[in-house]
Image (cartoon, rainbow, N blue to C red):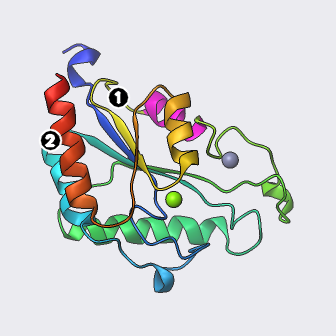
C-alpha cells in the first residue's frame, strides 16, 4: 500500500468556542461546558473517514493561570468523555505561549499561536492528511487566518449546534468533489 492510499481528509477544530463554551481561560473540567452537538459532529466526521484534531491557543499557561499539566489532564479527560460516546479525537495541539506572559518558560512570540498556522502545519506533518476535503472550524477570525495561512478553508462557527454546522460543511465538501 502506498502512503497516498492511507491519506485522509482532516477536520481541525478550535477548542474554546467550538468544543466548549469560551468562558475565558478554561483550565479545569469543572469550568468546562460542552457546546451542543459535539458528540454527533465528531462521530459523523469519524464515520465520514476524517481525521479529527483540536488545535487551541492556551495562553493561560504563559499567564500563570493554570499549568501545562492541567491542560494535558483536561485534554485527556475530554478525549475520554468523547471516546465513551464513540466519538474519536485523533490528536490535539495547543499553544501555551504568550509574548506578554509571566511564566518564564512560556514567554515567547512563537510560531504556533493563532493566527499563525504552526499547529495546523505540525498536525499535517505528523499525520497523513489529504488536503482535499480538509477544513478548519473556529469561532474567531484568528482561527480563519490560521486556516488561510495553512492553505485550508476556514469556517466561522457561531456557537449554536456543532452537529448541524459540520453536516453543512460535509455536504458542501461532497458537492465539490
Ligand atoms: Mg475559540
Ligand atoms: Zn506557541
The answer to which quarter of the image holds residue 62 is: bottom right
- 19 relative position to 63: left or right: left
The answer to which quarter of the image holds residue 107 is: bottom right
Above or below residue 122? Residue 103 is below
Give the dominant element type of the magenta stretch: helix, strand or loop: helix
Q: Is residue 90 visible?
A: yes
User: What range of the chain is rendered magenta?
Assistant: 118-126
Q: Which mark is residue 98?
A: none
Mark toward the start of the polypeptide (2 vs 1): 2
Q: Residue at x 20, y 18 (%)?
A: 5
Above or below residue 141? Residue 72 is below
Indicate the position of residue 51 as horizontal and vertical percent values.
29, 41
Q: How would you rate the neighbour count of disc 2 (Cα within 10 Å): few for under 14, some for 14-19, many for 20 or more? A: few
Tell me the residue that label 2 is attached to.
48
**Can you name the residue that lies furthest to the bottom here?**
30
In the rendered image, which quarter contains the N terminus?
Answer: top left
Which of the two residues, 47 or 151, is positioned nearer the viewer here? 151
2 vs 1, front mark: 2
Which of the two residues, 84 or 15, is positioned nearer the viewer here? 15
Q: Secondary structure at mark 1?
A: loop
Instruction: Reply yes or no: does residue 99 show up in magenta.
Output: no
Q: Residue at x 35, y 37 (%)?
A: 135
Q: Are marks 2 and 1 in contact (CB under 8 Å)?
A: no
Indicate the position of residue 138 as horizontal and vertical percent values.
45, 51
CA gap between label 2 and label 1 equals 14 Å
Tell me the residue that label 1 is attached to.
129
- 42 relative position to 127: left or right: left
Q: Residue at x 28, y 32 (%)?
A: 9
Which of the two residues, 12 or 161, is positioned nearer the viewer here? 161
In the rendered image, which quarter contains the C terminus?
Answer: top left
Q: Secondary structure at mark 2?
A: loop
- 84 relative position to 11: left or right: left
Amino acid at each position: 500500500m502506498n502512503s497516498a492510499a492511507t491519506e485522509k481528509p482532516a477536520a481541525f477544530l478550535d477548542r474554546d468556542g467550538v468544543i466548549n463554551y469560551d468562558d475565558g481561560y478554561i483550565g479545569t473540567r469543572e469550568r468546562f461546558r460542552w457546546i451542543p452537538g459535539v458528540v454527533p459532529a465528531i462521530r459523523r466526521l469519524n464515520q465520514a473517514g476524517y481525521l479529527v484534531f483540536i488545535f487551541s491557543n492556551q495562553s493561560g499557561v504563559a499567564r500563570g493561570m493554570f499549568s501545562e499539566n492541567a491542560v494535558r489532564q483536561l485534554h485527556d479527560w475530554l478525549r475520554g468523555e468523547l471516546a465513551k460516546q464513540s466519538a474519536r479525537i485523533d490528536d490535539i495541539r495547543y499553544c501555551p505561549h504568550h509574548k506578554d506572559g509571566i511564566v518564564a518558560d512560556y514567554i515567547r512570540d512563537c510560531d504556533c499561536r493563532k493566527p499563525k498556522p504552526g499547529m495546523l502545519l505540525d498536525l499535517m506533518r505528523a499525520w497523513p492528511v489529504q488536503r482535499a476535503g480538509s477544513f478548519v472550524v473556529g469561532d474567531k477570525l484568528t482561527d480563519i487566518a490560521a486556516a488561510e495561512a495553512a492553505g485550508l478553508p476556514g469556517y466561522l462557527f457561531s456557537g449554536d449546534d456543532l452537529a448541524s454546522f459540520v453536516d453543512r460543511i460535509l455536504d458542501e465538501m461532497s458537492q465539490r468533489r
